Amino acid sequence: MRKILSLFLLCIIPLFFSGCWDNIEIDERAFITGMGFDKYEEKEKKGEEEKETQVSNLKRYILTVTYPNVAMIAQKAEGDPSYIYSTVCASPSDGKQQINLRNNKNFYLNHSKVAIIGAELARDEKMMREILDVIQRSIYINRKIHIFITPQKAQEILTMDTGKNMDMGLFLEELIEKEITSPRRPETSFDAIITNLRESNASMFPRIAKGEKEVTTGGAAVLKGYKLVGWLDPIETRDVNILKGRGKIADYTIKIDKLYIVVEQMNLRSKMKAYEGEDKRINIDFEVEAEGILLQHYYGVPGEPFDSSYIEKINKVTEKQLTNEFLQVVEKIQKQYKTDIFKVGEYLRKFEPKTWEKVKNNWDEIYPETKVNIDVKMHVRRVGIEG
C-alpha cells in the first residue's frame, strides 16, 4: 500500500509545478512580426507650428508595427491577414506606449521576424545608433532578426499588400529563409551586421524596396560609421559577396564570339591578403577560384562546347569579365564610399600588426588610396545537360 501511495504522489506532484501565475493567453497577445522605423520629417508636419516644450512630446520617429491575424491563420476567422499600427513618437519606447493605448492586445516581441529602417533615418547617425541600441539592448528581440534598409519609408513596406494574403513580417521571413536563395543580397541577421560594424566600422545592410505590386530585396545599403553612405545594386552586391567569400554559387552572362552564354560558378573560393608593398603603399590582393558549368549555350552546335580549346576560351573570357566587374565594384566602395566593408584594416591588425601600427591613425585617408589586385581563375568542368 505504501508503495502504491508513493507512486501516486510521484505522478501527481509534477502537476503542481506546471502552473504559471502571470500567464497571458495566446488570443490576448499581439505577436509582432515586423517593426518599421522612419524619421519624422518637417514636411510631414503640414505647416503646423511646434509648440512642444517637453522632450517627451518631440516628434522624431514614425514607429510602425505589424502582427498577423492569428485566427485567420488557424482558419477560424476571416478578414485582413494582419493588423498594422503606426504612430509619431519621441522614441521607439514612446511609440510602443502610444500604440498600447490604442490596442487591446499585449505586445509580444519574442517572435519578431524583421526590422526595417527608412533611408532618411539611416542617414542620421545619432538616430541610427539609437535604433541599433534598441535592438541590441532588448532581451525580447532575437539576435537573428532580419534587418533591412529601404530607400523609401519602412511604413510603406509594412503597409503594402504582398499579394499572398499574409502578414508582411511572415512573408519576408519566408522570402529570406527559403532553401533556394541568391548571393545578390547580403547577410540579413542583426548579429552578422552588427559584428561587421563593430570590427571595421562598416557594413552592408540588405536593401528592401516597394515596387508597383511587389516587394524586392536585392542589393545593399552601405554604412560607414553607423551612417548610410550609398547603395549597391544586386549585381554589385553579388560581386562583393563573392570577394568576401560568402557567395558559393553564382551565374554570369558572358559574351563570346557574338553569342551570349551563361556560366554558372560552383565551389567559389575567395581569399584576401593585405600587406605593405615595396613602394610603402598598402596592397590588397583578391584571389578568386571557381569551377564552372555551361548553363546555357547555343542550340545546334553540339560539338563546340566539347572542344577543349573552346572551353579554354570560355575560361579566359569569363576570367577577364569577372576581373573587370570586381575591380569596378571595389573602386566604387573604395573611392566613392571610402568604406572598408572588406575588413582590410581588421586583416592588417590581426596578421600584419607592424604595418597596422603605421597606418591605423590615418586609415580613413589611406584606405581609398590602397592598390587593389584581383586574380580570377575559372575552370569550366561540365558542359552537358544540367537540371
Image (cartoon, grey):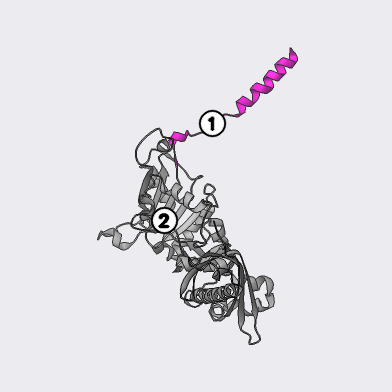
**Amino acid residing under circle 1:** Trp
Question: Over which residues does the magenta segment extend?
Answer: 1-30
Image position, residue 342 (x, y; %): 57, 70
Rendered image: mark on residue 37: 2
The overriding secondary structure of the stretch rendered in magenta is helix
Of the two numbered discs 2 and 1 on the same chain, state the one appearing first in sequence. 1
Image position, residue 264 (x, y; %): 54, 64
Query: Disc 2 on helix, strand or loop?
Result: strand
Query: Disc 1 on helix, strand or loop?
Result: loop
Work out which quarter of the rendered image holds the N terminus and state it. top right
As rendered, which of 147 and 39 lies closer to the eye?
A: 147
Residue 261's place in the image compared with 281, above or below, is above
Residue 325's place in the image compared with 381, above or below, is below
**Amino acid residing under circle 2:** Phe
What residue is pinned by disc 1?
Answer: 21
Q: Is residue 245 left or right of residue 124?
A: right
- The residue located at (38%, 38%) in the rendering is 104
Q: How many marks?
A: 2
